Image: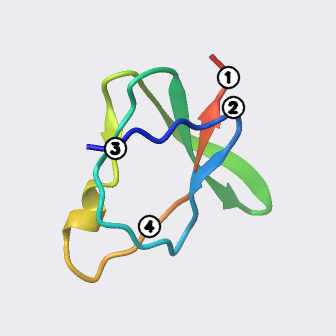
Amino acid sequence: MEVHPAKQWAEIVKTGDHDDALDLILEGELRVRMRIAGKETILTTLGTGEFFGEIFMVPARQMSWPTKTAPC
């Protein structure tokens, strides 16, 4: 397991990114967002103990939406 600290408002992954990791949020929040009709929309907010990136575990898949850290 590797720890990758992220600064507030840092973009963690972008639409179309490929990865082979399952990411666990150790502290803070992460917003899953996408642009709809030119406006940024928050799809969900993930917190401590939650994870994302499980879709990468399926072969030939890519990220469907970008995620960004949120203020704590």
Report the side of 41 relative to 12 (left or right): right
| Residue 68, image x, y percentages | 61, 44
Name the amino acid type tagged 1: Pro
Q: Which mark is residue 8?
A: 2
Instruction: Estimate the spatial distance between the alpha carbons at disc 4 and disc 2, rounded to whole Å.
Output: 21 Å
Disc 1 packing (10 Å; few <14; some 14–19; many ≥20): few
Q: Choose the circle earlier in sequence order: 3 or 4.
A: 3
Q: Choose the circle earlier in sequence order: 4 or 2.
A: 2
Foreground label between 1 and 2: 2
Name the amino acid type tagged 2: Gln
The residue wearing badge 3 is: 2
Foreground label between 4 and 2: 2
Instruction: Estimate the spatial distance between the alpha carbons at disc 4 and disc 1, rounded to whole Å.
Output: 23 Å
Instruction: Estimate the spatial distance between the alpha carbons at disc 1 and disc 3, rounded to whole Å.
Output: 22 Å
Q: Choose the circle earlier in sequence order: 1 or 3.
A: 3
Disc 3 packing (10 Å; few <14; some 14–19; many ≥20): few
Circle 3: element type: loop
Q: Residue at x 32, y 30 (%)?
A: 50
The residue wearing badge 4 is: 63
Q: In the rendered image of this protein, does residue 45 appear above or below residue 19?
A: above
On-image quarter of the C terminus: top right
On-image quarter of the N terminus: top left
Furthest-bottom residue in this view: 60
Furthest-left residue in this view: 58
Q: Residue at x 46, y 66 (%)?
A: 64
| Residue 32, image x, y percentages | 53, 45
Q: In the rendered image of this protein, does residue 7 appear above or below residue 38?
A: above
Q: Choose the circle earlier in sequence order: 4 or 1.
A: 4
Q: Which mark is residue 71?
A: 1
